[in-house]
Image: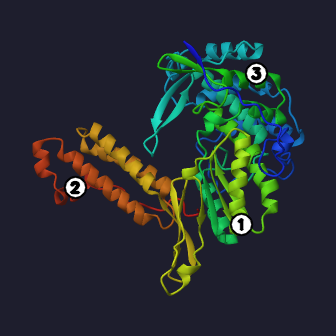
Amino acid sequence: MVSSASEARVPSGRDAATGGGSARSTEEAGQCPRREGAEQDSLFGESNTAAPEADKTVSTKLAGLVARARKEARLTNVVQYVDEELLRLAFGSLRKQAAPGVDGQRYEDYAANLDQNLRDLYARLKSGRYQAPVIRRVYIPKGDGKRRPLGITTIEDRVVQKAVAWVLSAVFERDFLDCSHGFRPHRSPHTALHHLRGGMRQHWARYVVEVDVVNYFGAVNRDWLRKFVRHRVNDGGLLRLLNRWLKAGVMENGVVTLSTDGVPQGGPVSPVLSNIYLHYVLDLWFERRFKKTCQGYAGLTRFADDFVATFRYQADAWRFRQEMEERLAAFGLRVAPEKTALLYFKGDQLLESKRPTRKPDTFVFLGFTHFLAKTRSGILNIVLKPSVKARERFIRKVRTWLTVNRHMNVRDQRAHLDKMLNGYYQYFGLRLCCTFLLGVRQRVRRSWVWALKRRSQKAKRRCDWATLSAQPWFQLPLPHVTQAWV
């Protein structure tokens, strides 16, 4: 059974030169990307786990393509780099525990006859006979109680998407601007936080515009996406592959739905396409057009579709919010009014001896609440702490695991809780965060006691706090600073 979704949006003819409206070409959508001097250096040796370049072998193999991207404004014949060797590297980079697609084939099933499978796959790609499979849709819970749709494709299609994602990343990485941090080599949420905090401190940014894009992956205009990709990669073979992925249906409860907008969220190529789209729609517009018209400092920090803008003057912030909404709307995107706001982040009154009449606002970005505080030496500091939503989400995850595994050996429980806490510390272990992390650790211990008491009536009598605290196996790792440079 096949049903049809929304009608394709046709780009309007309005001029986008002043912020709002739709552009008539990729040059109007954003100024042509810089060629020289655009190379992004590695920051602090940090790499994002979702970065398109998986290892040095892939980087070496695509070095020729990177050199071409540096010299040529528009590349052709880049699909030749998606050969059998790159497909093998792409397969090796996949998660072995990944869920199967609509065909039910798992990683180990495909690996059982890997050489023949890859030869057959490459032959179909080379001859143009490869067909993108239908995507299986699943839902994962979000922090606000809603569910996020994810598309799960087949193992074979994941291999092709990963290889193409590497190729597209090699071409566009030099074009992406410093404000973009999501799903890029040597960048991570921590580099985004460092960039945001450093810019605000250096330029005394006093106003923040936080933005939430509604259903970003489902609202991407495919006509514009094709134009943006073709602006740098005019390769018929690669563009046909892209079209097949965009047109592949989504299966949910046995029903296949065809849509004319959006990109499936969950495939290896989706993050790269997401960055390409917002690079032209938002990043270039902000850096090359809007920023030049501001009275004072203006900064943008983006991680995938999550971004904030900071300003020195309120007038610039008000104007950005209005023109930004017009700009996104021209390309099929809209913001959630209840989650988009202009925030007062000025802390002058905190330095005065009397009680401030208005406290500066706070905002959440990438799981951290940002707020102003006065240090003992009497200067203002931008402090980051784990947001309430991030802490509650982690505690719920711990309690769910403890409920399911409460009869497991206590030392095995402790090993798993150690791993969960250390992973939490690894992300949230910033300076001045240890006090908040201690609170999280204490709540994990209380949840563990709660689970232990429900093992049996005997355990309920013996598992008191004093007895358990004296046991070596009950000692969980203490929080520590893991990202001191942020």
Q: Is residue 193 left or right of residue 326?
A: left
Name the residue nearer the viewer: 59 or 13. Answer: 13
| Quarter of the rendering occupied by the C terminus | bottom right
SS class, disc 3: helix
Name the residue nearer the viewer: 94 or 101. Answer: 101
Name the residue nearer the viewer: 82 or 136. Answer: 136
SS class, disc 2: loop
Q: Is residue 162 left or right of residue 459?
A: right
Label 3: which residue?
240
Which is nearer the N-term, disc 2 or disc 1? 1
> Which image quarter: residue 133?
top right
Asked whether the viewer can see residue 458, the reply is yes
**Mark 1 and mark 3: Cα distance apart in space:** 45 Å
Amino acid type at image mark 2: Gln
Which is nearer the N-term, disc 1 or disc 3? 3
Identified at 23% across, 45% down, the residue is 451
Q: What's the coloring here? A: rainbow
| Quarter of the rendering occupied by the N terminus | top right
Q: How many marks?
A: 3
Identified at 36% across, 46% down, the residue is 396
x and y percent of residue 176 in the render?
75, 47
Label 1: which residue?
315
Name the residue nearer the viewer: 13 or 385. Answer: 13
Identified at 75% across, 14% down, the residue is 128
Q: Is residue 354 above or below residue 140?
A: below
x and y percent of residue 247 in the render?
67, 21
| Residue 471: mark in rendering | 2
